[in-house]
Amino acid sequence: MKILVTGCCGYIGSHTCVELLNHDYEVVGLDNFSNSKKEVLDKISQITNKKITFYEGDMLDEHFLESIFKDNEISCVIDFAAYKAVGESVEKPVEYYINNVSSVLTLLKVMKQYDCKRLVFSSSATVYGNPVEIPISEAAKVGRTTNPYGTSKLFVEQILKDLYHSDPSWNIVILRYFNPVGAHPSGLIGEEPNGVPANLMPYISKVAKKELTCLSVFGNDYNTKDGTGVRDYIHVVDLAIGHIKALEKLLKDECGISIYNLGTGVGYSVLDIIHTFELVNGVKIKYKMVNRRKGDIAVCYSDPKKAKEELGFVCKRSLEDMVRDAWNYEKNKKL
Ligand code: NAD
Ligand code: UFG
């Protein structure tokens, strides 16, 4: 059974390829390396002793996509290819909408042409905007996104709903990720942010490595237990396994269009993350309190019940696993 993985060399795509290969799926992958490196392909083979069939190219290129579907009988697509930097999306909205929305339209057109109507789409908890109720269930209102990246995910979710209503023979799973962190325990693949990391865990890893001097904690006056922001961090390997669970449901042709949160259901503060990182890894993280970051919310964590009940998905990896694997990847990278 061939599964097409778009953005297969990226952070979440590469971990998902490993899990797919471990579960004996045949993986066809595509990437344009706009935010990843070719070497990831060797690392995936090293971990699994298996190879994926790889195509280098852009998902916006219809002919390129057609050539993949012509060569391979694809049963299902898992779509990771997108730009993901919130700040950059504010500077470059057009580029973000083209890459994150137009590329999906191209993909859907070609999938339809080849009668491949099963899709797993990477969405984000960002579509909930500033949530009214915590924990956040899939029934919560979406909208009021604060940046073009988040809005691009909202737009694609709507496009997929419209598509399904026009043709219920599609089977679509939309996965709303909370905060993916950590790395494969082998230390061979992990997160590779461009430039100075905008996200918490990669920033902490760089401070631990002394590539950055000090972490700025964005706000200690939130209404949380220690005043710092609370998030639902999910180990990237658990997240990848969530895709296998979604795929299993899709392949039984029984989901129509379904939306699932992928998170642990537990919220940790910024200080929890810093202190656990220090304790587990035996390193010191220098940090200072600064003003809140514009657009941040106080608390965001998931209600993971629906994914548990309908997909049988439960996160197995702890915060200790997340910080250990994040650091293991970072410290071994250039040794
Ligand atoms: P990533 O940047 O590491 O991976 C994306 C991959 O897609 C990269 O390898 C990039 O080169 C490729 N790509 C981008 N545009 C492409 C195009 N037009 N054609 C071909 N390849 C293209 O990102 P990630 O963290 O692995 O995220 C994967 C998906 O999950 C994205 O859709 C992202 O929006 C979503 N998501 C990520 C997070 C997170 O915190 N990492 C949270 C929620 C949702
Ligand atoms: N934080 C700091 N200092 C930093 C970076 C982050 O204090 O240098 C804090 C933030 O204020 C927040 C927490 O750490 O309280 C987590 O911040 P991240 O930037 O790591 O993650 P966000 O929750 O802001 O956003 C992430 C992705 C979004 C995605 C969202 C939900 O960046 O794309 O998770 O999935 F939409």
Image (cartoon, rainbow, N blue to C red):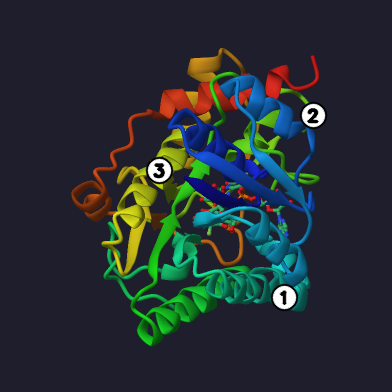
**Residue at 64% in and 37% down:** 52
Tell me where residue 45 appears, x and y as whole percent: 65, 25
**Can residue 289 be spotted in the picture?**
no
**Residue at 62% in and 46% down:** 28
The residue that disc 3 covers is: 244
Tell me where residue 185 appears, x and y as whole percent: 54, 21
The residue that disc 2 covers is: 211
Mark 1 vs mark 3: in front: 3
Secondary element at tag 1: helix
Tell me where residue 197 appears, x and y as whole percent: 71, 44
Which picture quadrant has residue 125? Answer: bottom left
Who is closer to the viewer here, 30 or 204? Answer: 30
Secondary element at tag 3: helix
**Residue at 74% in and 49% down:** 55
What's the mark number on residue 98?
A: 1
**Label 2 – label 3 distance at C-alpha:** 36 Å
Mark 1–mark 3 CB contact (< 8 Å): no
Amino acid carrying mark 2 in the image: Glu
**Can residue 2 be spotted in the picture?**
yes
